[in-house]
């Protein structure tokens, strides 16, 4: 169903939940990719740490130019089913096939095999996540309701991440068996949620755009907008910080802090589960104090909670559980608030230019996340290799290697997140400014819709005064 935009309003919760449902499998896949697959490739498949880091880095670098192309294609898409809905359907099969080929891989596969199927996986994930993000900007038009919608999306994603953590605990056997089971979980869940989202969620499409076409020049103009420069850099470092911990998580808590493999799974579960409460809390707080102020506060809180992990005595679950819960609670704020702020900028761009560029704007921030992922895994694994850290199962590492692992995991993210929070000092596009933008957009859209109705009834083009084509 495609509808014209109406006045800003609070979306019904069933609509929001149906729209957010695809975040379940996407978040689950993202967690496995960041935490389990690097160890699966290095430990089970027999690839070296350097080879795994190089493979992921190569794929990310190749993938960098993909999102701008997808964003431009999505913004110019016209169909009876909407602008972004068809793309969501197209992306799902790519994800399902790549998950099967990677999660079910057996020892003996080459680095080229990993690179090839990672490219397919990232293509599918890019299509699905970008389509949902841009669709969300059109679905929720109110400043505060956007915080709510993206908060629900993050919360649903947390549920997916928690569920995927339960899967290996319920499967008997080796680490590889758990990865296989997680793969089947994602393959089955993704098409179900895509059907729910596309069948229930409406898609609001602006009555018309001044120019539906976009070029790389438009992409550059959007990138150089002051508010987008801030958002892009902030999103980059806010993703880079926690992203550094993902690939190193199992190594840090098992080798540096002395927790058993089951204990690391339990700690990770609390970290992920905290995101459910965190997403709802930060969404609520952003509505109360403004998105940019909430992000500044979150960056400070992250530095405190992340640093406290080094104070906790080794192998002390009673303290590690609340510590990991606190870190997960705070870090859940970054993505959801930035995504909601991008939607606000998209409204301002459409008011100024008359063009729908939500797809391109979200492509900017998703591209920065890809750059961050490439840098975190490649640099972190390279640094660990330089300090002599050995990721092989049963390996004994030197104190120097363990110290290098701790520094990479704990303190590097703190510095990066501080830079991200500083980007929002003096932010101008607050609730008051956005309310004025939406008022003008709603008025213009209503006039455009009325003109189209009159044109359809009279058979004449009100824009140029010529008779219609019939």
Image (tube, rainbow, N blue to C red):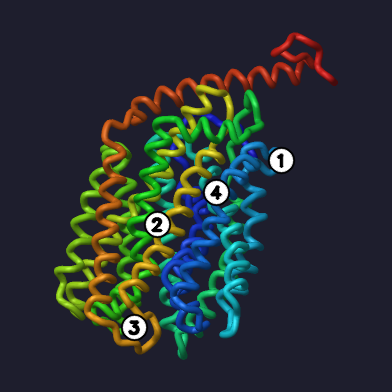
- Seen from the viewer's position, the closer of residues 89 and 105 is 105
- The quarter of the picture where residue 344 lies is top left
Q: Which residue position is annotated with label 4? A: 130
Image point (29%, 51%), residue name: 417
The local secondary structure at tag 4 comes to helix
Q: Which residue position is annotated with label 3? A: 261
The local secondary structure at tag 2 comes to helix
Q: Is residue 111 visible?
A: yes
Q: Quadrant of the C terminus?
A: top right
Q: Are marks 3 and 2 in contact (CB under 8 Å)?
A: no
Q: Earlier in the sequence, mark 4 or mark 3?
A: 4
Q: Is residue 188 visible?
A: no
- The quarter of the picture where residue 408 lies is bottom left
Please tell me whether residue 25 is drawn above or below residue 435 in the rendered image.
Answer: below
Residue 310 in picture, x, y percent from top left: 18, 68
The local secondary structure at tag 3 comes to helix
How many numbered discs, if any? Answer: 4
Spatial separation of the CA atoms under disc 1 and disc 2: 30 Å
Q: Which residue position is annotated with label 2? A: 155
> Which residue ends up furthest to the right in the rendered image?
470
Q: Earlier in the sequence, mark 1 or mark 2?
A: 1
Image point (30%, 87%), residue name: 396
- Seen from the viewer's position, the closer of residues 175 and 202 is 175
Q: Which residue position is annotated with label 1? A: 79
Near mark 3 (Cα within 10 A), the count class, few <14, some 14-19 or many ≥20, is: some
């Amino acid at each position: 169903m495609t509808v014209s935009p109406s006045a800003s309003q609070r979306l019904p919760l069933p609509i929001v939940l149906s729209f957010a449902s695809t975040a379940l499998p996407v978040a689950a896949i993202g967690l496995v990719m960041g935490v389990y697959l690097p160890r699966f490739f290095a430990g089970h498949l027999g690839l070296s740490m350097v080879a795994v880091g190089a493979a992921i880095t190569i794929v990310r670098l190749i993938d960098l130019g993909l999102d701008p192309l997808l964003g431009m294609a999505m913004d110019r898409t016209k169909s009876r089913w909407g602008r972004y809905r068809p793309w969501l359907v197209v992306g799902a099969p790519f994800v399902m096939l790549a998950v099967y080929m990677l999660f079910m891989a057996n020892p003996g596969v080459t680095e080229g095999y990993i690179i090839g199927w990672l490219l397919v996986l990232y293509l599918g994930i890019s299509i699905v996540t970008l389509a949902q993000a841009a669709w969300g900007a059109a679905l929720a038009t109110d400043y505060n309701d956007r915080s709510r919608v993206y908060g629900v999306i993050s919360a649903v994603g947390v549920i997916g991440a928690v569920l995927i953590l339960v899967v290996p605990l319920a499967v008997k056997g080796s680490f590889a068996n758990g990865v296989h089971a997680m793969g089947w979980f994602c393959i089955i869940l993704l098409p179900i949620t895509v059907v729910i989202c596309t069948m229930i969620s409406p898609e609001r499409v602006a009555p018309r755009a001044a120019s539906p076409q976009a070029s790389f020049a438009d992409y550059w103009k959007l990138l150089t907008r002051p508010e987008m420069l801030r958002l892009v850099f902030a999103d980059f470092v806010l993703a880079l910080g926690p992203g550094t911990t993902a690939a190193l998580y199992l190594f840090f808590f098992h080798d540096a802090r002395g927790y058993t493999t089951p204990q690391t799974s339990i700690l990770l579960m609390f970290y992920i589960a905290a995101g459910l409460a965190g997403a709802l809390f930060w969404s609520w707080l952003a509505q109360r104090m403004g998105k940019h102020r909430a992000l500044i506060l979150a960056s400070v809180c992250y530095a405190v909670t992340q640093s406290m992990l080094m104070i906790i005595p080794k192998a002390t679950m009673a303290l590690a559980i609340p510590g990991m819960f606190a870190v997960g609670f705070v870090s859940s704020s970054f993505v959801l608030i930035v995504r909601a702020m991008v939607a606000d900028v998209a409204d301002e761009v459409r008011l100024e230019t008359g063009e729908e560029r939500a797809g391109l704007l979200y492509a900017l921030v998703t591209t920065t996340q890809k750059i961050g992922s490439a840098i975190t895994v490649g640099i972190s694994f390279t640094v660990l290799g330089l300090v002599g850290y050995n990721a092989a199962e049963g390996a004994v590492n030197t104190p120097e290697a363990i110290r290098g692992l701790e520094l990479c995991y704990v303190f590097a993210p703190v510095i990066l997140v501080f830079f991200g929070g500083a980007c929002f000092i003096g932010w101008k596009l607050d609730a008051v400014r956005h309310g004025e933008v939406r008022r003008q957009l709603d008025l213009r859209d209503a006039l455009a819709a009325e003109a189209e109705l009159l044109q359809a009834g009279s058979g004449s083009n009100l824009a140029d005064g010529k008779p219609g084509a019939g």
